[in-house]
Image (spheres, rainbow, N blue to C red):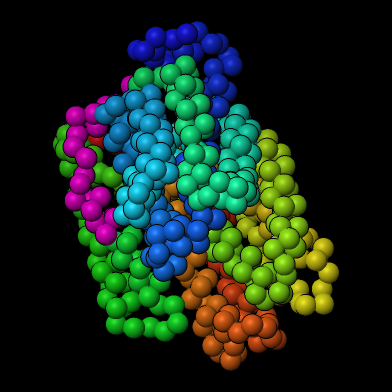
Amino acid sequence: MPGPSATLTELQALYGEKYRWLLLLAVMVGTMAAIMSSTIINVAVPDMSRHFGLGQERAQWVASGFMIAMTVSMLTTPWLLARYGYRRTYAGTMLVLLAGNLVGALAPDFSLVLAARVVAGLAAGVVQPIPAIIIVQSFQPHEQGRAGGIFGMGVVLAPAIGPSVGGLLVDWFGWRSIFFMVVPFCLASIWLARRYVPTTPPRSLLAKNRGGKLDWPGLLLAGGGTICLLNGLVQLHGRANPTALLLLAAALGAMIGFIVRQHRLGRALAQEGDPPLMNLALFAHPPFAMGSIVAFIYGMALFGSTYLLPVYMRLGLMLSPSHVGTVLLPAGLMLGITIPLVGRLADRQPTHLLVSSGLVLLATSFALMGTVGPSASIWMLTAWAIVGRIGLGFILPSLNSGSLRGLDRALLPQGSSTINFLRTLGGAAGVSVCGIVLEWRLAAHGDALSNPASSPGRLAAFDEAFYMLAALCALALLAAWRLRAGTRLAKPG
């Protein structure tokens, strides 16, 4: 077993050719724990709200608080890796995630549950950019697609099985039990980190950043802007109001302030200054710039559809929960099959072709939802859902590696954290945007989801929301087509 100071070179010599796959397994288990922690809570919100005597809106903050913390903390991953190395950063975040879930399970009041969820969200955000860095650094270009496919197949299992198993645990043991579901994954990831994760990243990543300070003002701007954006979008539900406009204006101001500060820190970095949270030099690399646009819009479409599709089936088509599961399960299984197959293609085919093909399939799936009505076969609905999940399977293994390929190694942590941040931020915004569009179109058709029965107007409103998602995918397609391999960026500074 490797000692506590095992470097990347020592581990490669110890385990040989198989080492890169063992390292991938180690970070995959931790990422599964992080993603599962973000998804399982939704099934427990109703029981938790009853236990603490809360309204549904306040109880929902255990999910929203986690999401906001996770989104913002992704920006700190490069600084943590440069300062503490791979193993201490990765194992430390797993310990924090483990502690957050244990405290959440045992907390006597809601305020402590919420605080524990925010802490767990911070840890989940830090760990998620790490696998993309590992894949690009540890695997040859002709292997990166296959590695991304295997990693993606493992990770999609977390949101697929998390809510289902979590629902059973809530029924059998109560809402507190779902927090314990993440514990075995955290413990396994810590053990794997001890064996396979190196103590430090390659020397090129340490460079000047090791002695730099974390950009706390930039982090506050990013966090405050994210909170204002998501709350502003929530306030827009139903109708525009001064509070929503004020929050969105504050989000815009925070975003401008963040960009100005990152630009200034990026210029100062050449003179041994503190590192920025987001190195804007990344966007001078065309594949990364285009990949970032695709990631943000893709996040909106993915998370937005994850919210919209079950609501459509339950309140638009008036299907039972078992029928909803019948539709979503084959689509989820098809996604798990598609990802590793496309991962192999990604080693031989251009990234922009695979990502564009996935976006076309995803847009087609959304557009075809408009052909489904109350009299349509459930198998038609299942088929269109499968088309969309196949599209996701084309995008997931290709987008990160294609965007990061060609970057200087010193920029890889910044690139991975930035693209993950933008995708997650897009996802958080996408859920609210879908809700806003749906309420707007329902009002235009003279219906509301509070009405007990569906109507042609309600179905038309859902169709128009799906068409909006299809249009978003078409917009992303314009950027995806320019996602071509570029030249390597010069080392910053």
Foreground pick, 11 / 124: 124
Q: Quadrant of residue 387 in the image?
A: bottom right
Residue occupying the point 53% across, 39% down: 181
Q: Is residue 347 above or below residue 370?
A: above
Residue occupying the point 37% across, 41% down: 103
Say whether residue 213 is magenta.
Answer: yes
Q: From this viewpoint, which residue is outermost toward the bottom? A: 446
Foreground pick, 374 / 198: 374
Provide the residue span drawn in magenta: 203-224
Q: Quadrant of the C terminus?
A: top left
- The answer to whether residue 284 shows anywhere in this view is no
Residue 87 % position (x, y):
38, 24
- The answer to whether residue 130 shows anywhere in this view is yes
Q: Quadrant of residue 148 in the image?
A: top right
Foreground pick, 285 / 40: 40
Q: Main secondary structure of the magenta part?
A: helix
Residue occupying the point 44% across, 25% down: 190
Count of residue discs: 0
Q: Is 106 placed left or right of 172 in the picture?
A: left
Residue occupying the point 34% across, 53% down: 109
